[in-house]
Structures are given as C-alpha cells and as structure tokens.
Image (tube, rainbow, N blue to C red):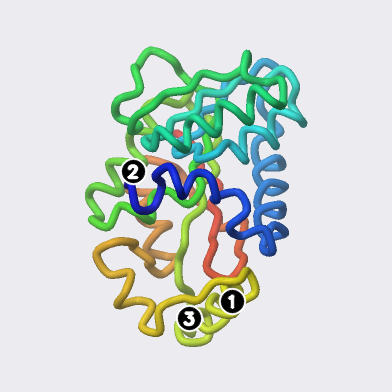
Amino acid sequence: MEELFGEQAAESYDGHFAKLSMMRDALHLVTQLALKELPDDAHVLSVGAGTGAEILYLSERFPEWRFTAVEPSEPMLRRCRAKAEAAGVASRCTFHHGFIESLPSGVAFDGATSVLVSQFIVERDARVAFFREIASRLRPGAPFLSADLAVPEPVEQAIALWRAAWRHAGHELPENLMEAFAGKVAILPPSDVRDIIADAGFTDPLLCYQSVLIHGWLSRRP
C-alpha cells in the first residue's frame, strides 16, 4: 500500500499519466452515460476513490449528487478531500478512510463506481467478496460501473500496445510484464473478470469500455 499509494505516490499520481488523459476522459464519459439515469439527489459510492477524479467529474455534471469516497490510502484520501474543497464540492462528499468492508452499513446507495481497484486483489474468492460488499450497499436495480486491467487475446499484441502506451506517458514496463505482476496485480482475461462480477451477485455485466488493457463493465444489483 505504501509503495503504490503512499505519500509520494499521492503527490505525483495525477500527473503520472497526464499524456494518457484521453483514456481517463473517455472512461469518465462512459461513466456519466451509465449513471445518468440516477435521480437528481442521488448518493453515489466511489470505492477506491483515489484522488477523486471520478467524483470531481461527476459532481460538475450532476450538481445535486452526493458522494461517499472510500479509500484505504490516507495520503490519497487527503488529496481527494483537498481537491473536492478546491472545487467547492466537499460539502456534498463523505470521506471514509478504510476498505469497503469497514464502511458502516445502513446507507443504500443509488449507484457506485470502482475504477482500477479490484485488479489489486489477486485471489479470486477475495475479489468476488470485494464486489459482493459493494453490491450489498446498493439499492435494488442500482447501476455499478467498474473498470480494471484485463488482457485480451492475442495477449502478446495487447501487452505490446500497453507497453507502448506507458512509454508514451514517459514510463517503462518490466520486460516480463506478467511475471512481474504475478502475486501483485491480477490481470485476467476480460471474460474472467466478467464472471467474477457476476459471481458477486451483479446482473449481466456489460463490457462498455476498452482502451488497450483497461476494461469497463456496467452491471446492476438485482
């Protein structure tokens, strides 16, 4: 946690992939379209909120929505809060330091997002449990937009393109990428991630976004 999302990482996180911002922007647009059915006073859960990119984007487009940001990294959550304050939307946000299972129950959210989070849960059962915790906090029928790394076929070409994207952003990936990620990041085939989401109780996960290895799914609590 400290290595990936500690104080130093939080400070540089927003600028780390600035040259790939169009990938983020496209995912934000898909998220907006996926959640636009929610009521004007919707309360949206952001799991693994990071520095608050999704919250800031959605708060601008839906000025009456409220948000709960769940983030286990205290430095990342501090930056999220600071950005929300600077944007004038902190009064519409609740900031929870911890993992999703530590979020008090009792609030049924109208929708949820989780972007580039579950890939760090390498054991399948634990990953299913993560999504199940999210599902348990949603209203029946509530939409859920999740995104994670997944490697499509042909694997070698997909990884080569991903390496090119990182190089464009000014970074280099390990030569043996999958071996380097083993035990740290679960980069599975897209169909496997879809099955994990479905096994957690969400209905009909739709692959609604892809940019190289980043895949996004729209699903619902039954």
- Camera-near label (1 vs 2) is 1
Q: Nearer the viewer, residue 166 or 125?
A: 166
Q: Work out which quarter of the rendered image holds the C terminus and state it.
A: top left
Question: Measured along the vertical axis of the image, is residue 33 above or below residue 37?
Answer: below
| Badge 1 amino acid | Arg
Q: Secondary structure at mark 2?
A: loop
Residue 153 marker: 3
Horizontal and vertical percent for residue 25? Answer: 71, 52
Horizontal and vertical percent for residue 40? Answer: 72, 19
Q: Secondary structure at mark 3?
A: loop
Q: Which circle's residue, 1 or 2, is located before the other in the chain?
A: 1
Q: Quadrant of residue 90?
A: top right
Task: From the image, tell me which residue sits under label 2.
Answer: 200
Inter-mark Cα distance, 1 to 2: 35 Å
Q: Secondary structure at mark 1?
A: helix
Residue at figure coordinates x 60%, y 71% from the top left = 170
Task: From the image, tell me which residue sits under label 1.
Answer: 167
Q: Nearer the viewer, residue 69 or 210?
A: 69
Inter-mark Cα distance, 3 to 2: 25 Å
Would residue 116 be found to the left or right of residue 58 on screen?
left
Q: Which circle's residue, 3 or 2, is located before the other in the chain?
A: 3
